[in-house]
Image (tube, rainbow, N blue to C red):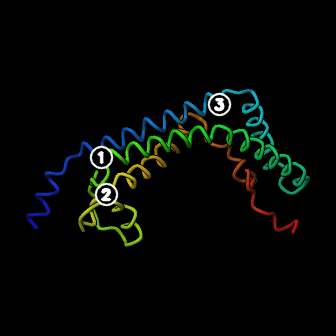
Amino acid sequence: MAASSTSFSSFRYGDSLSVVAISALTAVLCEAISWLLIYRTSSYKSLRSSIDKASKKLQSMKARKMDRVEASLKESTRDLSLSKFKSGAVVAAVLFVVFGLLNSLFEGRAVAKLPFAPVPLVLKMSHRGLPGADPTDCSMPFLYFLCSISIRTNLQKLLGFAPPRGAAAAGGGLFPIPDPKTN
């Protein structure tokens, strides 16, 4: 018991703070790229406005003439997804480079200590590439992944870049879910 508390207290938090800070900076950089390539364009603004109008109209209409408005909403959502897809390659390249750099910097080093022993499936992800058998050691890829998804999602909401509410409800996007009514 004393050995585990000693190893926990001697653990440096610098690595974990570095990964979290780099993850936050990467999220800001990716959103800046997205703003340059997508969010400031007039086509994005008109598509977003079209989606907002169609979703409000769809909610107010409920049952009557829903199909026409719903089709318009799906088309606008698909067009919006296509416009965002263009900058996706640039953002993916940035994330790939940053991940590769971090992976080489923190290879084989625990960057955080988990306050619990995770279930086996999560343990395989959180302990990936680490020597030793301490299940509370956390690898850089796991911490970076958790930080990236949480920080970027919240940053998009904060900056107002999150997809319009009607876009998700319309089932649009690049790969829409088939409509059971039409099949």
Q: Which residue is mark 2?
A: 138
Numbered label attached to residue 37 = 3
Element under label 1? helix
Element under label 3? helix
**Does the residue at mark 2 contact the one at mark 1 (Cβ under 8 Å)?**
yes
Quarter holding residue 83: top right
Vertical comparison of 39 with 180: above or below: above
Q: Residue at x 28, y 51 (%)?
A: 111
The amino acid type of the residue labelled 2 equals Cys
**Could you say which is closer to the camera, residue 147 or residue 107?**
107
Q: Is residue 64 left or right of residue 101?
A: right
Quarter holding residue 67: bottom right
Vertical comparison of 128 with 155: above or below: below
Q: Residue at x 80, y 49 (%)?
A: 74
**Crowding at mark 3 (Cα within 10 Å: few <14, some 14-19, many 20+):** some
Q: Residue at x 70, y 27 (%)?
A: 41
**Crowding at mark 1 (Cα within 10 Å: few <14, some 14-19, many 20+):** some
Counting from the top left corner in percent of width and height, residue 40 is at: 66, 27
The amino acid type of the residue labelled 3 equals Leu
Q: Which residue is mark 1?
A: 16
**Quadrant (top left/top right/bottom left/bottom right) for the C terminus:** bottom right
Element under label 2? strand
Vertical comparison of 180 with 160: above or below: below
